[in-house]
Image: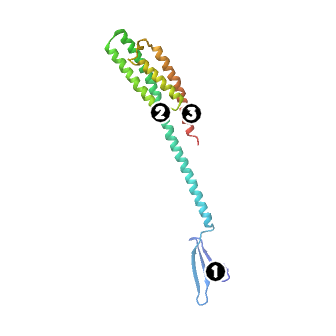
Amino acid sequence: MVIDKIQIIKDTINNYKVISVPLKNASYKIIINQFPSETSIGEKILENSLTIIIALIAGLVALYQVKSNIVSTARIKWIETLKEDISNLYNYALSAVFFYSEYINETDNDIYLKYLEAHSKFYVLSNRIKMQLNIKETKHNDLNTILDEIDSMLDSSNKQLKNITQENVEEKLREIVIISRDIFKIEWEKSKKIFKI
């Protein structure tokens, strides 16, 4: 294309424009400048900015999902551990009452040692459960209170221990089961909500 004796040649492969200009005492002088292709610099910046923003958003969503998965997995593991501890606690509480009532009837030291072992395991599990509870939540506090009540019922220093029956302890244990179900339901719902974006 010739415009007022200035010739512009476009090199589409290398994205150059070659401009030839006639001079008085010489032939043509060639000036080579690199220009962006048909899009302007502003359009290129906008295009690259959008790509970066989309990549950042995708990265943040992926990070949120990974965090959600980790939190949800930990919450589910905590629920399973708590369930197992409560079921074992039930067994040790009833065993402690049984062995103590047998000890009163027979005054056999081996049976008393079995009572102490069952009560000790109950006590350890009770404390383990308490450490998993959130004292800011009402149901958790209720569970903590019942655990303390059962522990004081089963304690050998309790003068009323000889009058405590399996039914007394089972009543408290049933309360634990009811409260635990509520806790598990609430925590499971929280776990399901974590996945929602």
Residue drawn where x is 57% and y is 81% of the image: 30
**What SS does tag 3 mark?**
helix
Circle 2/circle 1 CB separation < 8 Å = no
Q: Name the residue under label 3.
A: 189
Task: Relative to 76, say whether 94 is above or below.
Answer: above
Label 2: few (<14), some (14–19) or many (≥20) C-alpha neighbours in 10 Å:
some
User: Which residue lies most toward the bottom here?
Assistant: 25
Task: Relative to 58, say whether 7 is above or below.
Answer: below
Q: Name the residue under label 2.
A: 78
**What SS does tag 1 mark?**
strand
* x and y, in percent, of residue 193 in the image: 57, 37
Q: What residue type is labelled 3?
A: Glu
Q: What residue type is labelled 1?
A: Gln
**Which one is earlier in the sequence, the residue at label 2 or at label 3?**
2
**What SS does tag 2 mark?**
helix
Q: Mark 1 points at which residue?
A: 7
Does 47 sit left or right of 96 as displayed?
Answer: right
User: Which residue lies most toward the left here?
Assistant: 109
Distance between the alpha carbons at the discs numbered 2 and 1: 78 Å
* x and y, in percent, of residue 162 in the image: 41, 12
Looking at the rendering, in which quadrant would you find the N terminus? bottom right
* Front-most of residues 176 and 44: 176
Does 32 sit left or right of 116 as displayed?
Answer: right
* Front-most of residues 10 and 153: 153
Q: Which amino acid does label 2 sit on?
A: Trp
Residue drawn where x is 47% and y is 33% of the image: 78
